[in-house]
Image: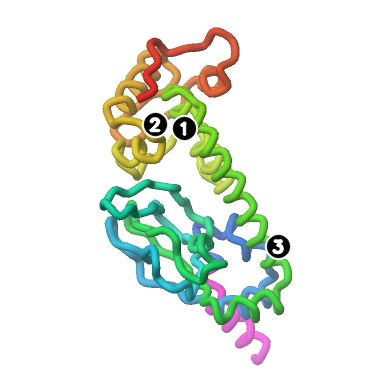
Amino acid sequence: MNTLKTIVTLNAATDACQLCHAKSVCFSSHLKTEDLHRFKDAVVHKTPIERGELLFMAGDNIKSVFVLHSGSVKAYLESEDGDNQITGFYLPGDVIGIHGIEKKCHTDTVEALETSSVCEIRFNNLDDIFDSFPALQKELLDFIFKEMNHDQEMMLVLGKMSADRRMAYFLLDTSKRMQEHGLSNSRINLTMTRHDIANYLGLAVETVSRILTRLQKSEIIHVDRRSVTIINRARLEKIYSCSGNEHIGHRNNH
């Protein structure tokens, strides 16, 4: 009877993690059931935030890191004149809130692109968690290094690449990340607006629309409202790499 009670207690305690859509890519995915039970005690499952709501703002003290459970969010920097520069889009399983840890305050603002939920790991618990689960420290560090590499890639994209290559990069990068998160890598659900995409890639909204239209006419992708299906990945990769004679018409860098 006691054994059965223990099993029921463990199952109830770990349901939130075991039923999570992002469990396979969450940095707690390698924990055993007993460890997951203890880990869950240090995690707060937040009330979902709706599209347009903020998870935190630039300048807020860092008290937690977050793991996106479902939905999607965008991060952006705010300038003194009120303009925002989008710095990234996050998918389920991604860790949010690591930028600015060394300053102990968030350097960016994070806003929900759709109804989204996060798991909160409070910062005063982080040392205890890593002491109990050393593997989690490696997972978090791996994610931080991945973010740093991605930031460097974006600097190259924005500084050196044509508009066509930027769009190809965005579609291929999003596709790759979706595959890493256990989702289809051919059909991309764009929860962000074209204005968001343009802001992120340093392009005009009209340029983004024109490139998507040309890619569709060239039968490289199919666009259905906010859904983009990659039809010919090889040609899209050629556009990104500028290899061969692959092109999609007149190139616009603005």
Label 3: which secondary element? helix
Image-quadrant location for residue 7: bottom right
Relative height, residue 10 to residue 15 (above, below) = below
Q: Amino acid at mark 1?
A: Leu
Q: State the image coordinates of residue 41 (x, y, percent, origin top left).
A: 56, 81
Q: Amino acid at mark 2?
A: Val
Asked whether the viewer can see residue 116, the reply is yes
Q: State the image coordinates of residue 8 (x, y, percent, origin top left).
A: 58, 81
Residues at circles 2 and 1 in contact by the CB criterion of under 8 Å: yes
Task: Compute the Cα span from label 2 to label 1.
Answer: 9 Å
Mark linked to residue 138: 3
Q: State the image coordinates of residue 79 (x, y, percent, origin top left).
A: 33, 52
- Disc 2 packing (10 Å; few <14; some 14–19; many ≥20): some
Relative height, residue 136 to residue 143 (above, below) = below
Label 1: which secondary element? helix
Which one is nearer the viewer's eye here, 135 or 3? 135
Task: Compute the Cα span from label 2 to label 3.
Answer: 34 Å
Q: Amino acid at mark 3?
A: Lys
Mark linked to residue 171: 1
Mark linked to residue 198: none
Image-quadrant location for residue 124: bottom right
Q: Residue at x 57, y 83 (%)?
A: 9
- Between marks 2 and 1 in the image, the one whose residue lies nearer the viewer: 1
Quarter of the image for the C terminus: give it: top left
Which one is nearer the viewer's eye here, 78 or 16? 78
Residue stretch rendered in magenta on the structure: 1-17
The residue tagged 2 is: 228
Image-quadrant location for residue 195: top left
Left or right, 95 with reference to 113: right
- Disc 1 packing (10 Å; few <14; some 14–19; many ≥20): many
Q: Residue at x 49, y 26 (%)?
A: 161
